[in-house]
Image (cartoon, rainbow, N blue to C red):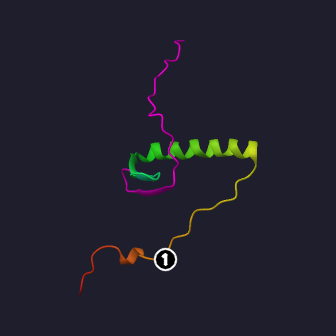
Amino acid sequence: MSDPQQQQIPIDGHAHALMSVLVNFDEEHFQLLMMSGGPARLYVASPKHAKRLMLLLQKQLADYEAKFGDLKTALAAATKGTTEEEVGFKVKK
């Protein structure tokens, strides 16, 4: 068997506190808009890569909870404002 190759990953040296993530998708891509106090960054992933990211986060959270206890949280509720029916063009009949 060959030895696994080491890969150098450059890191910019600055820590960014993730403040908000907006996720959207279509048939081909998942778009993750991540905000950390400065300019937002848009990341695009294939559906398979997005699922791998979800599985990795699930595993890491399970390990965290096994060590530190259960986290009590839920998805944020939708805010009052624009509804899906209000988005787009209005066509008069």
Q: Which residues are magenta?
A: 1-29
Q: What percent of the width, then of the height, locates residue 38?
A: 42, 51
Q: Is residue 32 left or right of residue 87?
A: right
Q: What percent of the width, then of the height, locates residue 24?
A: 42, 58
Residue type at mark 1 is: Lys
> Tag 1, which secondary structure?
loop
Quarter of the image that includes the N terminus: top right
Pick the residue in front: 24 or 67: 67
Q: Is residue 8 magenta?
A: yes
The residue drawn where x is 47% and y is 46% is 50
* Dot 1 alpha-carbon crowd within 10 angstroms: few under 14, some 14 to 19, many 20 or more: few
Q: What percent of the width, then of the height, locates residue 86?
A: 36, 78
Q: What percent of the width, then of the height, locates residue 72?
A: 70, 58
The residue drawn where x is 38% and y is 47% is 44
Quarter of the image that includes the C terminus: bottom left
Residue designated by label 1: 80
Q: Is residue 91 magenta?
A: no
The residue drawn where x is 58% and y is 62% is 75
Q: Is residue 74 left or right of residue 47?
A: right
Q: Is residue 50 above or below residue 14?
A: below
